[in-house]
């Protein structure tokens, strides 16, 4: 019983067997992502009602909020795989964490950029130091730091494991950073400027954001798996 | 005492050795020879636990050294290529620190005694001012104070030594083996230690 | 175990003493950075008084970062780091001792010098104790978190800058709480909350970072 169960778990932990699986899951997720994105954008731009206070400009939240969710979610997933890699000494987990980072960084940047685009018509400034945007900025630094560390290390195994330690330290810090930035924001600006004060959510708005979030998730899976495949190839572990 | 089972080592993309096994009992000396780059230092570092082998395991008295960690470290003395001394401290200060780090308190009499054996008694100058040979001897001065560690792992102990110092190393190694310890060392030169087992590492493969 | 920790701290202090110049430059950097801000933003007293806590804290962050890259590098180069890994004490204790020595040499002096900078910025003397206490609690955390970065970047090219990139985002909560405590006190409120949080951060860091530092060292030294 235990033998069969352990075989099941670690069967796909070998880069060689994971490689083809990753290929077709990536393709399937890519298609799903496109479909969900089409649905989400349709709901966001055509179905959801115009906001009373912010007009049409608010529609950027259909990208901004899901992107922000993804940026944080992906960091946690990255740290999870990193921890698995360190604990069980599996090669694939480290490669997975390495593959997730650029996508996470992309979503963080997207959240920041769309946040800026939202801020301009709403508050008149291209950047506001509100709690969420500032936390996203620091999250971007954490992602870039992770990628820079791995880029600076020649040995792939050392790079995977060093990155893993950094990711774990980072994930523990993220809630602390988030709360300290929240507090900092109240200390300096009171209750004035806040991009996080979203309009009261009509059901269609929530639906739109959820669809986009799922679309981004499928996209992340597709792109990260494609990247893992490339890493597996580079390290010569793809087999025949 | 010390067992290595099917060790495999990969450095910088090259497989240095594969399927390497060895066993060392009390009183035995093992000499590891091989050309430069054949993995002598890597093997020694795998045996100490500083480097994890790509495959295989090392066991001390039947238990894997990975699970033993400091317990294993307490039973060994490793002298690597670098003399492991701080330039800004004197030989005596360095030796005192090395002993404390290893968990063995040494009196100043013992320390000066050990330094004397290697001809470094009485020098209070920072080791930056010593010659390469003297620095090597300052590092080797740990040996007389390491009788309590059964396993000695020495990387090129004879490099940069004159005959007198080399003879001191010989007698220390002999004495240690005679009292039940084990010594593993790497060397280019024809070491004057009779009765040592030899493990030869060729450029890219095993025993 | 504690005798080994004490031995390491004394060793590092002795080494720093014999190389006073190195220690002095990091502290001088602190003073120079803090002195640059008025040159950049103008010397209007109200403005300076307002930015003083933040400036002092940022300067402290940068200054402690400077000496961090040397934390393990020198020992790694001459082989003493390996001996520490093979010593009789658990690696967690060894690295905690190294971080403690770093703080004594690079962090604690900042606590002493900060009032001088505060003087330059015409900060009310009533705020000096809060400033000093916030630095006293925060700088050890900077040393501990910084040591993780130092261990991860050991021997890498671009070491010092890469270390800063990795560690500065992680230092943000300490910066916010540290500077914030002084600002809260300046507004007439009690900084107790922020100072307690700093203390809590110190306890948490002291408990958990040694694991991370030790793991990172073992990874880097292979």
Image (spheres, rainbow, N blue to C red):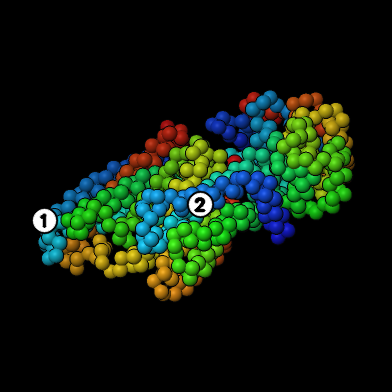
SS type, badge 2:
helix
Above or below: residue A55 compared with residue C23: below
Q: How many labels does the image show?
A: 2
- Give the residue at mark 2: C30
Residue shown at 43% from the left, 50% from the top = C36
Can you identify the residue that label 1 sits on? A46
Label 2 packing within 10 angstroms: few (<14), some (14-19), many (20+): many
**Which residue is found at the position 59% from the left and 48% from the top?**
C24
On the rendered structure, is A112 left or right of B132? left
Q: Could you say which is closer to the camera, residue B19 or residue C179?
A: C179
Percent position (x, y) of residue C89? Answer: 69, 55
What residue is at 87 percent from the left and 39 percent from the top? B117
Residues at marks 1 and 2 touching, judged by CB atoms closer than 8 Å? no
Percent x, y of residue A229: 38, 39
Quadrant of the drawing holding the C terminus of chain A? top left
- Residue B151 in view: no
Q: Which of marks 1 and 2 is in front?
A: 2
Answer with left or right where residue A232 lies relative to residue A24. right
Q: Residues within 10 Å of mark 1 (few under 14, many from 20)?
A: few
Measured from the top left, where is residue A88 in percent x and y? 52, 50
Give me the residue at 22% from left, 64% from top: A198
Q: Quadrant of residue A52?
A: bottom left
Q: In this view, does A129 lie above or below C65?
A: below
Q: Can residue B14 be seen in this view?
A: yes
């Amino acid at each position: 019983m235990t033998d069969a169960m352990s075989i099941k778990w670690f069967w796909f932990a070998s880069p060689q067997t994971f490689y083809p699986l990753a290929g077709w899951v990536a393709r399937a997720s890519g298609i799903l992502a496109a479909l969900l994105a089409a649905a989400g954008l349709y709901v966001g731009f055509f179905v959801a009602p115009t906001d009373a206070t912010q007009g049409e400009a608010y529609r950027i939240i259909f990208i901004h909020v899901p992107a922000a969710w993804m940026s944080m979610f992906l960091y946690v997933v990255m740290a999870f795989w990193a921890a698995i890699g360190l604990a069980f000494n599996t090669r694939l987990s480290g490669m997975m964490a390495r593959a997730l980072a650029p996508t996470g960084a992309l979503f963080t940047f997207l959240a920041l950029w769309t946040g800026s685009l939202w801020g301009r018509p709403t508050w008149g400034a291209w950047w506001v130091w509100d709690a969420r945007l500032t936390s996203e900025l620091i999250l971007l630094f954490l992602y870039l730091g992770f990628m820079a560390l791995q880029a600076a290390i020649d040995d792939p195994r050392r790079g995977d494991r060093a990155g893993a330690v950094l990711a774990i330290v980072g994930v523990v810090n993220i809630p602390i950073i988030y709360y300290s930035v929240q507090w900092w924001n109240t200390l300096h600006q009171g209750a004035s400027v806040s991009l996080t004060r979203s309009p009261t959510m009509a059901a269609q708005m929530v639906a739109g954001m959820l669809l986009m979030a799922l679309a981004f998730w499928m996209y992340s899976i597709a792109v990260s798996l494609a990247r893992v495949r490339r890493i597996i190839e580079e390290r010569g572990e793809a087999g025949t | 005492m010390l067992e290595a089972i099917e060790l495999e080592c990969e450095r910088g993309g090259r497989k240095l050795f594969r399927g390497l096994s060895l066993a060392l009992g009390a009183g035995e000396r093992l000499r590891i020879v091989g050309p430069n780059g054949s993995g002598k230092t890597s093997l020694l570092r795998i045996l100490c636990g500083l480097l994890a082998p790509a495959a295989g395991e090392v066991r001390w008295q039947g238990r894997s050294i990975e699970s033993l960690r400091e317990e294993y470290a307490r039973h060994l003395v490793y002298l690597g290529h670098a003399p492991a001394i701080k330039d800004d401290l004197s030989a005596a200060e360095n030796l005192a620190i090395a002993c404390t780090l290893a968990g063995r308190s040494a009196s100043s009499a013992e320390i000066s005694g050990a330094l004397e054996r290697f001809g470094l008694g009485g020098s209070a100058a920072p080791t930056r001012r010593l010659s390469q040979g003297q620095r090597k001897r300052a590092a080797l001065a740990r040996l007389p104070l390491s009788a309590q560690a059964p396993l000695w792992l020495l990387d090129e102990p004879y490099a940069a030594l004159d005959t007198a110092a080399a003879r001191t190393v010989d007698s220390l190694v002999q004495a240690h083996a005679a009292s039940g310890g084990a010594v593993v060392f790497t060397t280019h030169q024809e070491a004057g230690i009779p009765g040592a087992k030899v493990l030869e590492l060729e450029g890219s493969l095993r025993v | 175990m504690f005798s080994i920790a004490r031995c390491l701290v004394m060793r590092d202090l002795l080494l720093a003493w014999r190389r006073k110049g190195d220690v002095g430059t990091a502290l001088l950097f602190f003073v120079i950075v803090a002195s640059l801000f008025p040159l950049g933003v103008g010397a209007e007293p109200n403005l300076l008084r307002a930015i003083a806590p933040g400036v002092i804290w940022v300067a402290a962050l940068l200054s402690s970062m400077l000496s961090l890259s040397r934390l393990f590098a020198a020992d790694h180069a001459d082989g003493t780091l390996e001996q520490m890994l093979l010593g009789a004490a658990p690696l967690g204790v060894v690295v905690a001792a190294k971080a403690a020595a770093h703080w004594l040499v690079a962090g604690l002096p900042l606590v002493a010098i900060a009032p001088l900078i505060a003087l330059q910025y015409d900060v009310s003397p009533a705020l000096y104790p809060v400033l000093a206490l916030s630095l006293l609690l925060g700088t050890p955390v900077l040393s501990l978190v910084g040591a993780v970065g130092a261990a991860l970047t050991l021997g890498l090219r671009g070491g010092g800058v890469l270390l800063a990139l990795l560690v500065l985002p992680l230092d943000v909560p300490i910066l916010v709480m540290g500077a914030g405590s002084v600002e809260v006190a300046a507004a007439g409120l009690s900084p107790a909350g922020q100072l307690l949080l700093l203390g809590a951060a110190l306890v948490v860091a002291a408990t958990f970072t040694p694991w991370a530092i030790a793991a990172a060292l073992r990874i880097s030294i292979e």
